[in-house]
């Protein structure tokens, strides 16, 4: 299919990237590495108005959407990882010692009833965000706040969150699980892992201290991203370090070190290895729920059963 034909289809039929899957299955090897798939897509759209959009696409997500559209498993091994998570429900309950089961908890509806907390945090208004959060937790009698996986959040409202895969939608659904607790709360590794990345992203509204670990399961591998940590957590480890399950290996950072958010952990799982995990999206389009379930599966069952 020629580039101008692709552009015409997208313009006249308002097609999203998943809709291109069946049309491009013969033009692109969708079993190839993600970077190769995006490179081929870039070749096909070179010189068209789509070129700039393709250049901004996350190659891992782009390949998953094209594969889904072509009737393939969006992420090779994604279903197997979800099955492993279901089979190990509750096994990660000790992520905060001795167990999240011992901590009174409450779900924080950051896209709804307590969106004022999210708005204050996103506005980097530390005092207001902390005051609202403390008052809410006191009313609920809770010590652990939970920001759910795939929750819709109104805070992602700027043009930066318009989808490059389908401009008719925006990225406004959370792709990790947030656990809110006091700054300095220690986190315990629930499964043996090897450090892939350990870095400090000292940018407001970013991750602050961040660690990424690789884990083995059954016959496969997956990756876990631990964001909004203290700087010391990131400095403690280097790529290649092996960390045993049960190790207290990092802690939640305070505002100045966690990207200027309320103290919390953003835990996100990935069925794919990113060349640079800081590129992995933390929020995504609600329209692509099937993709996110395979690519960034919900860690909630592992922790809460």
Image (cartoon, rainbow, N blue to C red):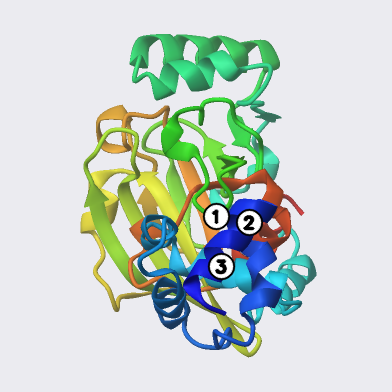
Q: Which residue is mark 3?
A: 6
Q: Circle 1 — which element?
A: loop
Quarter containing the N terminus: bottom right
Label pair 1/3, CB-CB below 8 angstroms: no
Sequence-wise, the earlier of marks 1 and 2 is 2
Q: Position of residue 134 (x, y in %)?
A: 52, 14
> Between marks 3 and 2, how big is the CA–CA gap?
11 Å
How much space separates mark 1 and mark 3, taking CA atoms?
Answer: 14 Å
Rendered residue at 34%/34% (across/down): 205
Q: Relative to 215, does residue 294 appear above or below in the rendering?
A: above
| Front residue (pair 99, 189) | 189
Q: Which mark is residue 16?
A: 2
Residue drawn where x is 62% and y is 66% of the image = 65
The residue sitting at 36% across, 56% down in the picture is: 52
Q: Earlier in the sequence, mark 1 or mark 3?
A: 3
Is disc 1 in contact with disc 2, using a CB cutoff of under 8 Å? yes
Vertical order, 166 against 106 (above or below): below
Neighbor class of circle 2 (other Cα within 10 Å; few <14, some 14-19, many 20+) is many
């Amino acid at each position: 299919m020629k580039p101008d034909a692709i552009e015409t289809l997208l313009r006249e039929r308002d097609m999203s990237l998943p809709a291109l899957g069946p049309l491009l299955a013969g033009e692109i090897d969708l079993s190839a590495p993600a970077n190769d798939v995006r490179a081929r897509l870039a070749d096909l759209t070179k010189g068209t108005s789509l070129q700039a959009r393709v250049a901004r696409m996350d190659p891992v997500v782009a390949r998953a959407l094209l594969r889904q559209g072509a009737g393939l498993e969006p992420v090779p091994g994604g279903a197997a990882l979800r099955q492993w998570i279901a089979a190990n429900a509750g096994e990660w309950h000790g992520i905060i010692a001795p167990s999240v089961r011992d901590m009174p908890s409450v779900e924080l509806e950051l896209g709804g009833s307590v969106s004022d907390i999210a708005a204050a945090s996103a506005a980097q208004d530390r005092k207001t965000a902390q005051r609202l959060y403390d008052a809410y937790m006191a009313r609920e009698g809770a010590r652990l706040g939970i920001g759910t996986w795939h929750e819709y959040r109104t805070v992602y409202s700027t043009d930066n969150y318009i989808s490059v895969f389908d401009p008719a939608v925006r990225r406004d659904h959370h792709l990790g699980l947030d656990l809110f607790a006091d700054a300095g709360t220690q986190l315990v590794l629930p499964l043996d892992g090897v450090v892939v990345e350990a870095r400090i992203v000292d940018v407001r509204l970013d991750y602050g201290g961040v660690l990424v670990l690789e884990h083995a399961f059954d016959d496969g591998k997956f990756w876990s991203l631990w964001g909004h940590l203290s700087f010391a957590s990131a400095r403690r480890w280097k790529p290649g370090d092996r960390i045993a399950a049960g190790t207290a290996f990092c802690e939640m950072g305070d505002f100045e070190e966690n990207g200027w958010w309320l103290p919390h952990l953003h835990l996100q799982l990935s069925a794919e290895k990113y060349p640079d995990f800081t590129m992995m999206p933390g929020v995504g389009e609600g329209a692509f729920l099937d993709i996110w379930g395979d690519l960034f599966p919900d860690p909630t069952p592992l922790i809460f059963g």
